[in-house]
Amino acid sequence: MHIVRYAMYKHRHLLSREELAEWLGVSPQTISNRLSRGDDLPPSFKSGNIRRWSEHDIAKWIEERIKPTSDNLSHLKKAATQ
């Protein structure tokens, strides 16, 4: 089975660069810039010239970045007691 078809079957919906940009609230050019610089982005795969991101991987990537860390919690606790 072709990799894109398999991924679409497995993840149900794959997002384009434009759709990912909309999810993240940035421009498609920002996604391209981040890709070319190797900046942090959700995991993706490329088949030929087509790069896609799964909704599941994007949601997981976002969730990992908004989880409170012990560092964040200590700052919040300090702020709450002042």
Image: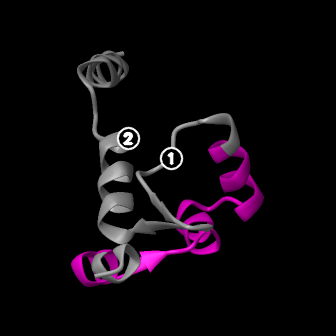
Q: Which residue corresponds to the image point at 59% horizontal and 36% vertical from the top-left?
A: 39
Quarter of the image for residue 68 reads top left
Q: Which residue lies furthest to the front in this view?
A: 1
> What's the magenta bit mostly, secondary-structure-wise?
helix
Quarter of the image for residue 8 reads bottom left
Label 2 residue SS: helix
Q: Could you tell me the amino acid type at mark 1?
A: Leu
Q: How far apart are marks 1 and 2 (CA)?
A: 11 Å
Q: What stretch is highlighted in magenta?
A: 7-35
Label 1 residue SS: loop
Residue where numbered disc 2 is placed: 65
Residue where numbered disc 1 is placed: 41
Q: Where is residue 78 in the image (x, y as percent from the top left)?
A: 32, 15
Q: In this view, does 25 lie above or below 13?
A: above
State which tag comes first along the sequence, 1 or 2.
1
Quarter of the image with the N terminus is bottom left
Q: Where is residue 28 in the image (x, y as percent from the top left)?
A: 71, 63
